[in-house]
Image (cartoon, rainbow, N blue to C red):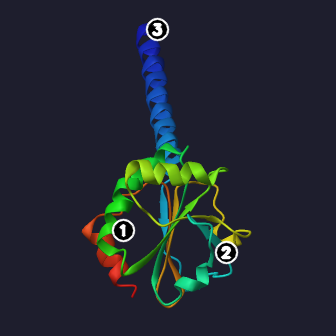
Amino acid sequence: MKQIKNIGILIILMASMISFQSNAQARSNENENKDETATMPDSTQADFNFKLIDKEGNTKSLADFKGKVIFMNMWATWCPHCIAEMPSIDKLHEEMGDEVAFVMLSLDKDFEKAKDFDKRKGYNLPIYEPGSNMPTMYQSSAIPTTFVIDAKGNLALTHKGTADYSTQEFKEFLNSLK
């Protein structure tokens, strides 16, 4: 009888441990995926009050791209996830660069590093550095972060984390925003 009682206690302990491990794994998976999120807001007007400085030192405004679909990616050379998604962004830029305004916003403290990286990799992406304070709606605690603004000036997508932007599905999404 004592042996049956001990086996019962052992089974309960093992079931508790399995349940605890399953819950811990679920929480871990939730945390791992928190840095990769995409949201599509409901017709939020984009903030165009943002100055940019291009590779040649010229100042532009995000407002200069009004009327076009805008793909704005915040990245840095020291960010491995940013570097990982660059080939897909470069491919997208090669295929849609005439139809979509690309704003590759470097968050490097030294803008020369970003320009050197772009040149070394042979990308020739339109790289900018912030020329004014970043509007609140574009401030993010994660990089890479990508914002897509439709041709009407609405924020159509916010994506935090790495993505493959060269897919046919994403190109069709961009085309639907014209």
Residue occupied by mark 2: 51
47 to 80, vertically: above or below? below
Helix, strand or loop at mark 1: helix
Q: CA distance from mark 3 to mark 2?
A: 78 Å
Q: Identity of the amino acid at label 1?
A: His
- In percent of width and height, residue 98 lies at 36, 79
Q: Amino acid at mark 3?
A: Lys
- Nearest the viewer among 25 and 170 is 170
User: What is the distance, in whole Å, between disc 3 and disc 1 at their CAs?
Assistant: 73 Å
* Residue farthest to the right, as pictured: 133
Marks 3 and 2 close (CB-CB < 8 Å):
no
Left/right placement of residue 83 relative to residue 111 reads: left
Q: Position of residue 138 (x, y in %)?
A: 63, 69
**Who comes first in sequence, dot 2 or dot 1?**
2
Which quadrant of the figure contains the N terminus?
top left
Residue identifier under label 3 = 2
Q: Residues within 10 Å of mark 1 (few under 14, many from 20)?
A: many
Amino acid type of disc 2? Answer: Lys
Secondary structure at badge 3 equals helix
Q: How many marks?
A: 3
What residue do we see at 44% from left, 63% from top? 125
Question: Which secondary structure, mark 2?
Answer: strand
Q: Is residue 119 visible?
A: yes
